[in-house]
Amino acid sequence: MKLRKIALLTACSMVTAMTLNWGSGGTVATTAQAAEVDGPKVKWLLSTWGKRRGIMEGMESFSEQISKATDGNFEISLQYGGVLSDPKENLDGLKIRAFEAAMFCPIYHPSKTPAITALDLAFLPVTDLESRVKVHEAYLHNPVVLDELARWNAYPLMTGLMPNYEVMGKGKAPESLADWKGLRVNASGGIGDLMKTIGVVTTTVPAPEMYQSLERGVMDGVAFPYTYAFAAYKLHELSTWRTEESSLGSLTCVVAASKQAYEALPQQYKDLIDRVKPIAYQRQIDTYVEIDKKNEKLFEERGLKKVHFSDADVAKIKEMAVQPSWDAWVAARNAEGLDGQALLDSVLTLAEEAKKSK
């Protein structure tokens, strides 16, 4: 356990050697460093998570850049809509080598990769997408996380970058912390745990059914990635209020390759993967920025009331909900034989390093 903890703390001190070439202003180069990379013919099939949405724009760019730099010799074919696998079984598919790469979201099967769920905890001090890239990239290469992924024959390629979550709802807007008590909100993972501690009744309705559930009054609100998910499912058409800058946190989806497929790549292809990732992440961030501009206008036209947590409410939430939920996560990981506190500390340390590097 001591050796594991030392490895964890060592991993915390670095924001990966590739640190994604993020400059002090959070920008990256917009073109790959190498125009041509010679190598053998390689084709990967990548099982995505559902349909093509904003979260996949980074991987679309990644695939395009890889193909362009190799003149099509290294092809990563993104397969949407569960063509290759039920998304919740993508890790299982990697384990049996059914395809070469896949996206998976630990919140839907936390017992498969419990260490990674540290990134799903509510109120982590990671509030912008550039910092989230740095934290996730480093943490996914933490020795404990790599060992966890290896049990599924998986090796991390990228994080599926997700914006912060907010809540959008129908009916009377919650004006104070007390007003949240009894509200029925669709929320899961660390955000759902947080909601429960302030008296919210959480539900877990599948995304395609949320519009109907909100319309029928089955639930009062939805916690979703802001802004694109709300607009994608047209929830703003029914809603009357939304939270703003609540810092609830986000959820993590990971794009991983099968270990065999990754290890079989020639070194020049592995180096190329590291070079194009910053470009792909910037494409992802730019996509969200453009989507937000469009959606913010829709929300304003709808006249949605903006709900803010006061400083006093935030302090109270942290006291009664955040630390207890973190402690519960640590205890659960300890019970599984992991060093939960070391894992949480590594995320918090990486978050602090990312903040200082901005």
Image (cartoon, helix red, strand yellow):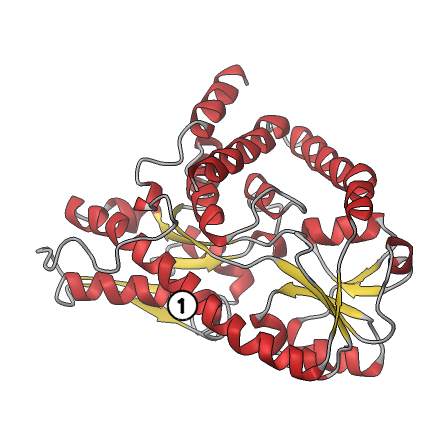
Residue under the image location 76 percent in, 49 percent down: 193
Q: Position of residue 324 (x, y in %)?
A: 78, 36
Give the secondary structure at mark 1: helix
Residue at 40% across / 68% down in the picture? 57
Task: Say above or below: 14 vs 77.
Answer: above
Which one is in front, 77 or 286? 286
Residue 133 visible at all: yes
In screen coordinates, is 102 left or right of 197? left
Q: Image point 77% across, 46% down: which residue?
A: 311
User: Which residue lies most toward the top here?
Assistant: 2
Q: Residue at x 28, y 51 (%)?
A: 261
Quadrant in the picture for residue 206? bottom right
Percent position of residue 122, x then y:
67, 47
Decide if residue 232 is in sight here.
no
- Amino acid type shown at disc 1: Glu
The quarter of the picture where the N terminus appears is: top right
Residue 47 image point, x, y percent: 42, 65
Taking depth in this image into account, of 330 and 175 the one nearest to the observer is 175
Position of residue 138 relative to residue 92, above or below, is: above
Q: Is residue 286 above or below residue 18?
A: below
Q: Residues within 10 Å of mark 1 (few under 14, many from 20)?
A: many
Q: Please identify the quadrant where the C terminus is shown.
A: top left
Residue 175: x %, y % from top left: 86, 62
Q: Which residue is mark 1?
A: 57
Residue 259 is left or right of residue 164, and the answer is left
User: Which of 151/17 is in front?
Assistant: 17
- Please indicate whether residue 187 sits to the left or right of residue 266 in the image: right
